[in-house]
Amino acid sequence: MIPPMGIFLKLFVVFIFVLEFEARPISYSGGHTLMHFNDSMKESVYYHYSPTYKYSFGIESLKDKTFNTSSAYLRLTYLLNRKNTKNSQRNLYFQSGLANKDSNHFFGIHGDWETRRYFIGFDYKEVNNIIDYKDKHIQLGVAPYLGEYGDLHTWLMVKTKKNSINNKQITYPVVKFFKGNVLLELGYDKKTDWDIHFMYRF
């Protein structure tokens, strides 16, 4: 027996909501996002505004733990490509930032593909700083259960990252939670300590 069209519509709305709230560098049109990042290389607070779903701009206050410096970055992110299907979404973004001193800047790409059950994401940046370097990571995840709209959603993930400063690859577990407008992502490795990402949309 084929379910009524109303059930199909409800499932599709839940699917799109869940994917759209993932930790994306662009929000919905007119949306504001506040983020906090903390890992072995940096600690930052980042705010951005999305006039449309195609791009966002904002400012990031960043403490660089590697070079022991602090900077403010003007940031721009642009959606290069997006494809939605009934069961998945794919995104590819260009990202960039320009610091307020020493002409420091970065640019790169960020991408992801996911269903309500599985996630694959990557990030690649080229950073101009005291020493120029490349930073990249890949993240894989699975949702142990499929929540409905308004539920607490959980992802169990593995993240592997590498930069050209120490040229070492590190892999560690990550768990991600989100509910409503709030997202929290926690990872830990004894070599790099905590990897924390907090996000609030409004």
Image (cartoon, rainbow, N blue to C red):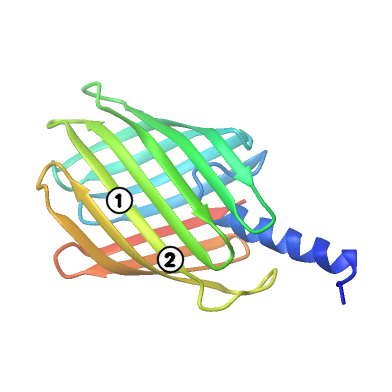
> Residue 9's spot in the image, x, y percent?
82, 61
> Residue 32's spot in the image, x, y percent?
59, 44
Q: Report the side of 163 relative to 78 (left or right).
A: left
Q: Report the side of 171 relative to 14 (left or right).
A: left
| Tag 1 secondary structure | strand
The answer to whether marks 2 and 1 mark residues whose Cβ atoms lie closer than 8 Å is no
| Tag 2 secondary structure | strand
Res 132 quadrant in image: top left
Q: Nearer the viewer, residue 178 or 11?
A: 11
Residue type, mark 1 in image: His
Q: Report the side of 167 relative to 109 (left or right).
A: left
Q: Residue at horizontal 70%, vertical 68%?
A: 149
> Residue 90's spot in the image, x, y percent?
55, 47
- The numbered dot on residue 58 is none
> Residue 97's spot in the image, x, y percent?
36, 30
Residue type, mark 2 in image: Gly
Q: Report the side of 110 relative to 86 (left or right).
A: left
- Packing grade of label 2 (10 A; few <14, some 14-19, many >=20) is many
Res 190 quadrant in image: bottom left
Distance of label 2 from label 1 (alpha carbons)? 13 Å
Quadrant including the N terminus: bottom right
Q: Is residue 8 above or below residue 34?
A: below
Circle 2 is placed at which residue position? 141
Q: Residue at horizontal 48%, vertical 42%?
A: 47
Q: Residue at horizontal 68%, vertical 56%?
A: 16
Circle 1 is placed at which residue position? 137
